[in-house]
Image (spheres, rainbow, N blue to C red):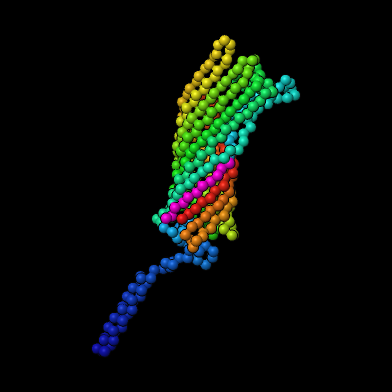
Amino acid sequence: MRIKSFLMIILIFSTNFAFSETLKTSSSTPLSQPKSISKSIDTDHCYYPAYSSPARIDVQAAWNFIVSASFIYWQPEMIGVDLGYIPSNDLSSYDSSIVNFDTDYYPGFKVLLGTHYDYDNWNINARYTRFHAKETEKNSKGDIIYHVFSESISISPLEARWRPKIDYFDLEVGRPFYSGKHLVMKPYASIKGGWTKQTFKFNAEVSGVKQEADLKNKSWFLGPRAVLDMNWLLSYDLKIFLNSSFSLMYQQFKTKDFFKSEFHPMTYSKRFRAKSIQITPTFDLSPGFGWSSYFDHNNWHVDLFAAYNFVYFFNQNEFSAINASGDLMFHGLEVSLRFDF
């Protein structure tokens, strides 16, 4: 009887010891993904993290700086900037036609400075864009009517000069990530700000009397900007991309208009000044094609791309008006070279 009791005690003790060891082993090895998660995106047999895998450019050097320079070649356009209209002598057969301002392409540039942070692979960029243009248009047909000088008498000759200037900056904070093995998404929160200056001058003759109009407009703007860049990775380090953004900014205008008519023996002149504010929406769209690669044992990374820019500012034409009535837009080529080090 004692032997049976002794054996029963040993069996119970052994069972408890084995069960406790099992719990200890299972608690020290949880059922989760292994620590050595593969960073490769070239195979389907790897473990992906629970969040989107970071897609930052990770050079071996410790600086983590970004430097970029871009050459832009844009054409400016603005609604409401025209030379006048040609009245029809026979409205039953021909309509009156608008004589538009024929604009050209002009150079400008962009510069960018940025950095990467190891903390969750965040990226900060600061970009500055400068574009100044000088447009001149002449017409000596003698059949144009421009409402600033006359509503019914044709003016001849006519010379117009439009000079749009814009300088602005973008401060971006975001985290690029892989949305697929070959698709990189780059959402950013951004601040956009800058200033514009436009002048519009006319010299003409109405019934032999010289007429002059000098219209000036200055503004500054500041507001939030949302950005989404998409990159499709191709073979041989090539890529196609589509960058887009939308801004909503506070903008303040100052307008100065000056008109002069040289009646002999006296000169008649008139001045007009105004200040106004508005909430200005803008959007940018840039499709393009590029190539990028690491070199020097991954100590450097170079990115070369070409894009076509579309930049649109709503309600920017305040010439001879209190309320802005025309949109300002730019479009053209951008060629960029970027270094990460």
Please state the extent of the stretch shown in magenta in the rendering: 63-73
Image height of 208 relative to 242, above or below: above
Q: Position of residue 206 (x, y in %)?
A: 63, 17
Q: Identify the residue at the far top of this view.
A: 265
Image height of 314 relative to 292, above or below: above
Q: Main secondary structure of the magenta part?
A: strand
Q: Quadrant of residue 138?
A: top right
Identify the residue at image location x=49%, y=63%.
297
Pick the residue in front: 325 or 267: 267
| Magenta run includes residue 267 | no
Q: Quadrant of residue 79?
A: top right
Identify the residue at image location x=58%, y=56%.
238
| Magenta run includes residue 66 | yes
Pick the residue in front: 83 or 158: 158
Pick the residue in front: 83 or 63: 63
Pick the residue in front: 222 or 161: 161
Task: Inspect this view and state whether residue 183 appears.
Answer: no
Quadrant of the snapshot with the N terminus: bottom left
Q: Position of residue 211 (x, y in %)?
A: 59, 18
Task: Inspect this view and state whether residue 229 appears.
Answer: yes
Q: Identify the residue at the far right of this view.
A: 93
Identify the residue at image location x=55%, y=44%.
71
Q: Position of residue 263 (x, y in %)?
A: 58, 12
Identify the residue at image location x=72%, y=20%.
89
Image height of 85 relative to 120, above or below: above
Q: Identify the residue at the far front of this view.
A: 265
Q: Position of residue 312 (x, y in %)?
A: 55, 38
